[in-house]
Image (cartoon, coloured by chain):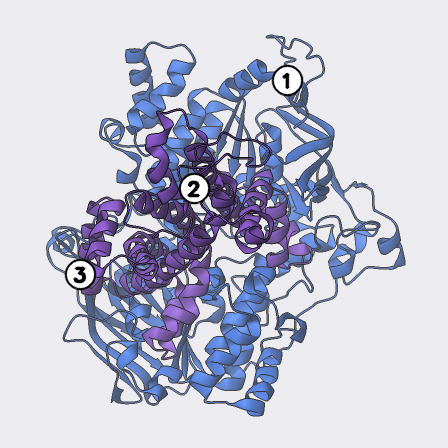
Amino acid sequence: MSTTASPPAPGETQATAADALTLSGVDISYRVRRADQRIVRDVSFRVARGESFGLVGESGCGKSTIALAVVRYLARNGRVSAGRIEIDGRDVLSLDRADLRRLRARTVSMVYQEPGRALNPSILVGRQVAEVYEIAGAPRSEALDRAREILARVRISDPDGVMRRYPHQLSGGMLQRVVIAMALAAEPSLLILDEPTTALDATVEADVLDLILGLRAEFGTSLLFISHNLAVIAKMCDRVGVLYAGELVEEGPASAVFGDPRHPYTVGLLRSIPRRDGGARAPLQTIPGSLPTPGSVAAGCVFAARCGLAQERCRAETPAVHRIEDGCGERGSRCHFSEQAQSLPIHSIVAPDSARIADRAEPLIRARSVSKTFQASGQRVRGLHQVDLEIAAGETVGLVGESGSGKTTLARVLMGLTAPDPGAEVTLDGRPLAPLAGARTAADQKALQIVFQNPDSALNRRHSVRRLISRSLAKLGGYRGEALQARLQALAESVRLPERYLPMRPSQLSGGLKQRVAIARAFAGDPQIVVCDEPTSALDVSVQAAILNLLTDLQHRERVAYLFISHDLGVVRYLADRIVVLYLGRVMEIGPAQSVLDGPHHPYTEALLSAVPTLDDSDRERIRLEGEIPSAADPPAGCPFHTRCPRRIGEICDTTEPEMRVQAPGHEIRCHIPVDDLRRLQSAGGGAPSASAGR
Amino acid sequence: MSIEALPVESRAALSAGAGDLRRQFLRDLVHQKAFMIGATVLGFWVLAAIFGTLVVQDPLAQNLSAINQAPSASHLFGTDQLGRDVLARVIVGSRSILVTAPLATLIGTVLGTVVGLSMGYFRGIVDDILGRFVEAFLALPLVVTGIIGIVALGASDTTLIIVIGIVFTPLIARTVRAAVLVERDLDYVAAARLRGERSLYIMFVEILPNVLAPITVEFTVRLGYAVFTIVTLSFLGFGLQPPTPNWGYDISANVGAVTAGYWWEVLFAAVAVATLVIGVNMLASSIESALDAS
């Protein structure tokens, strides 16, 4: 970070007309191995007073770097190498230490992705919040009172109780509220939110986003909102900037940019999201190629290498920002051919034949009365409770629920990584399966494979890609020698993993390539069923699309069944034939995908669907769940969902656990409300007591 | 604020280059001053151990007409109570320690790795039983455990190597266990189990390569301790046996002469011990920080 030459004493002279934040021509470099790597190039945007500005882009595009540079928090090897950053009209880069400290204390606040790491684990929450006021000069007792006040304002129902706890005693959503409260305590004029809800469940995310929207209106704070999630940005922001490889490729009002994109990258990004009605599993659009390494694009447009519209000019001449005059407000695109952006050719690898082969004659895998009780510090925690599940050959079953609902536990029980409680019965093709993988036959082991959520954890980082895949081919497929080499080639080709990656270690691959290796490994022994445990949640949208396409393609060729676990209902909607909804280890609803999604559905499913922000329907009536998922150590009596249910009908919900009730053939719901009432309530579009209108 | 959260970009830049992590590690290593100093010191002693006898006088040759002589042109470090050349004894004294200390550390590292891998991988009852042994060992001072072992087995260089190796085993096992506990919860271990791998394969082929970094650091740190422990035991008479020149014994044999003013008989051997221990520790810390960086 460049230190100041001679700071022009900023004092308290604030230009009131100034924007909350202005970046002009900002370059940011990291010094890596005695060479400067320019990570952010010539970025300019402004956040007007009271405005909410969104920065969106895939990982590695420089979003967080910009956020850090704004408050001069860059790592020691990073610096702003060109351009100006102004907050409230003050040049941030030339502030001296004392002024910088004052700026961070009073004018700007930041909220990060992981609330747990923003708080000191060994200090009471109340003290930490009060500290913000003490720094501002309030005496101790008054600071505590004001801390209580601000916690109440972020809608924490029991501020006193929260203040007396340590951070680890609070849930993720609650912690993020505390962090937001601390950020707002100084009444900053600019609030920077860096992926504030990415680590939270969809239901909690919806709640926190509503809170931020409400507080913004209340405090009049300007927001710089950073997210990889286009729908979240669309919901939260007035204006949006799309970053690609460190350049702001498009900028303008959110509705205009998302509704009428003018840069091929934005167009590609929007096309790669699974839409609510994208047709019967039309393959998702992807963006070919991968992010260029920093500094590798010397001349021309940074996106040219991946752009279907690129011409000679794009590779030779770096495009300037073209102003777009379409009456939608001030907007620009860094493309030579911005008016043609939407004619970007469609890129999807193959169109798998749309005929689904889901013959549900005999279930391939059948699980009966699967329960799993964990012992945690003397308490019995019920991870799963009497779960029944059948998966037919070639079918995709989507498994959804909040974190803590038992999705992963169910997957681990099926895989034999966790033994279920006695009494459970799991069969494969009619044969009983041993509870633990080690005791299963080789045939059972190869029939049942898994693609883990995080490829960094799932691939041994000391082994080469070739070794990772060949070991599975040898162990599961029984291949040896030349047959193994031939099969390896074929397998790598079928997951579209170019051969030059085979000698590399996982750390040298991008996230999408790593997941391809993991998929290749799972398919090494020609499995009958593959459990996909959130396989795309760690990936960027455009990469996610490619992986989902690959999975559908493989399914068509190999006739494999999937148990697809995801918190992203958009993805499940796109892939699943049937959907299972879990809550506190119990199946709340099970049925054909279309029927579950269209309803009438369980009130919990309804709330999950309502929580997901989408680009399509921002005017939808929203249902918000109160509070968080209860502890599985002490599940509520009666219907486990009654404590949060927006459609609770009365005493019976609190005392009697409902049975699964057949709503339609193959569609069962665990709810006391008669199906006809559910249909009436849900087609009326909300109207429940605690449902609140979004936006 | 979190440092890990930021340099996604700089990580991308890292893998953009040659991608050869090992070469990068070596480059990080040689750019550290501590590494260069440590390597120079250790290199000096290794050369002294190998070629010392060619350069200096006979360290065993007694000259009773020239005892307790102060440093001079003919005896740069002076002579001891038996008229032996102190320089020769210090230089050649490096030989025994540079054989015993690395061998003892190697034994301790190999045993410690096996024990630590088993404890961390199997956990449960294996961990409980081995853990009690480890704790029992750690409860006593190293030197005391060492003396008990040497007395029980009879003093010799081989016993010394084995005893120190065994004494180090629990210390290294504890470090390896901690590293393995982190690794065994990663999904690649689950994936290996799901394709029917045996426990031994998972421990030694899947997990071991991933915990080599802490093991390497532990080896170099323990090497410094081994030098120190061997010198201490030799000083107490339980370690390397005379007449082969060794620093610990020379210090103890001549320590009474210091009060008579013959300081050179002890000082140079003590300085030799200090340089070797410090040199090894500098290597250890530079290896650790280079591993952390990569």
Query: Residue A565: x, y in percent?
Result: 39, 66
| Chain letter for the blue colouring in the rendering | A
Given the current orientation, which residue lies at the most extreme front position?
Answer: B65
- Chain letter for the residue marked with disc 3 in the picture: B
Q: Quadrant of residue A529?
A: bottom left
Q: Quadrant of residue A426?
A: bottom left
Q: Residue at x 34, y 39 (%)?
A: B253
* B72 and A439: which is toward the camera: B72
Query: Residue A580: x, y in percent?
Result: 33, 68
- Chain letter for the residue marked with disc 1 in the picture: A
Depth check, mark 3 against mark 2: the one in front is 3
Query: Residue A442: x, y in percent?
Result: 35, 87
Check contact, mark 3 vs mark 2: CB within 8 A.
no
Q: Amino acid at mark 1?
A: Leu
Of mark 1 and mark 2, the one earlier in the sequence is 1
Q: Secondary structure at mark 1?
A: loop
How far, Cα to Cα, is label 1 from label 2? 29 Å
Work out whether residue A231 can be spotted.
yes
Q: Which residue is mark 2?
A: A114
A595 lies above or below B154: below
Q: Which residue is mark 1?
A: A95
